[in-house]
Image (spheres, grey):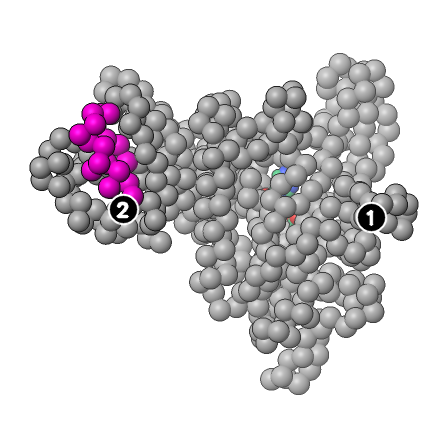
Amino acid sequence: MPEDTKKVDMEKIVSLCKRRGFVFQSSEIYGGLASCWDYGPLGVELKRNIKDFWWKKVVQERDDMVGIDASIMMHPKVWEASGHVAGFSDPLVECKNCRMRFRSTDIDTSACPNCGGQLTEPRMFNLMFKTFMGPVEDAASIVYLRPETAQAQFVNFDNVQSTTRKKLPFGIAQIGKSFRNEITTGNFIFRTREFEQMEIEYFVKPGSDQQWFDYWVKQRLDYYVSLGIKRDNLRLREHGKEELAHYARCCYDVEYNFPIGWSEIEGIANRGDYDLTRHSKFSGKTLDYFDEEKSERYVPYVIEPSSGVDRSLLAVLCDAYDEEPADKETRVVLHIKPEIAPIKVAVLPLSRNAKLLPKSKEVHDMLRPHLMTQYDDAQSIGRRYRRQDEIGTPFCVTIDFDSLDDNQVTIRERDSMQQERVPVAELLDRLKSKFSF
Ligand code: GAP
């Protein structure tokens, strides 16, 4: 395997995430809650940066895309129309001996993988979380936590089209939490029951759908490379007919070469006119498009690139992680794209000497309105550089005793470990020039 595609152990990523405050187990002091995770101070920054990057690429930089932020709970009829009540199920088998449950498609033996016991016949298990709205727990008050964000784009199609006056093709983007009562979870934040999605529903004229599908497959693969992920660690996989979701005509997954093997980070599906047609039928409201040029009405087809925030974040961490020899020891470094890194600049006085404090504070105060910074004066400068490398901070700024005389500081770059001396007056512009946004 080429040097730059070697894989990191998942345990090292999990351990780094906990040790440095990227991701903690949910409710840890109570023993944890299975498959639920909390993003800590660094994790929340990284996650926000990934979401902002996606939004910038798919909404801000495009004329043909707008965003929404819809409510997680929707009218229960939405999920009947979407086909999720009837069809969003996995085949569940249970061990008659140890009572462990599995998705039958995940196991290739007829005996329990845990204890060898006899398994029950598969029964379909609906993955939607059900709850009740209001004080009465009866059938009339059932609502679901959405298992995908996409349905809000469909049911708001007319609202968005008429208020923005967008012409086809155009898309509606949304980022938000989704919930699935997965039978089996695991591999850290890869498969959880509560997760976040970044979804585009791109509406096109029927007949042009294949062309737009091909376009989005390429766009999305390029997007992950621009997020800083190595091209060699990405691939596309076409779904076989038997694994297509109930709404999909065809689907490609973007897969990342995770420590657990090649696995999906995004699905790109051609949903045809399935969703708009079903919602028209179930709601009684027409959801179509009037093509002024052709003077005709039709129901648009939908191309859907649907990405997972948590899986993208895990891919970014796995891809960026490295252990390198440095000064007769090994440094752990995250080569995260600088724009995505949780902390952009660390401000490090050479020591805690009181004489360095005013200048160090002055530099920190100057930078922090513009860039996410961290101030650290504990332990030796070498250890502090290592600490910043380990969390992927692309630049450290060091204030030393010469700085007090010449008003210059040192910028140290994470990947090359090269240092350059710059006047404080030029520091902010110099640092800003190192980020493309
Ligand atoms: N609207 C289409 C849809 O939801 P999907 O392939 O089921 O398609 C899209 O999900 C993305 O959401 C996946 O590629 C993955 O990144 C993320 N995802 C789905 N289920 C997940 C889970 N249980 N845990 C974490 N991420 C999940």
231 shown above or below 375: below
Of residues 396 and 151, the one drawn nearer to the viewer in this rendering: 396
In what element is the residue under mark 2? helix
Locate residue 54, reporting x and y percent.
49, 52
Classed neighbour count for the residue bearing mark 1: other residues with Cα under 10 Å, few (<14), some (14–19), many (≥20): few
Which residue, given by chain and number where applicable, does mark 2 sit on? 366
- Type of residue at label 2? Met
| Residue 190 appearing in the image | yes
Q: Main secondary structure of the magenta part?
A: helix
Which residue, given by chain and number where applicable, does mark 1 sit on? 134
Residue at left 86%, top 25%?
120
Locate the N terminus by quadrant.
top left
> Decide: marks 2, 1 in contact (CB < 8 A)?
no
**Between disc 2 and disc 1, whose residue precedes?**
1
**Bounds of the magenta segment:** 347-366
Residue at left 23%, top 32%?
357
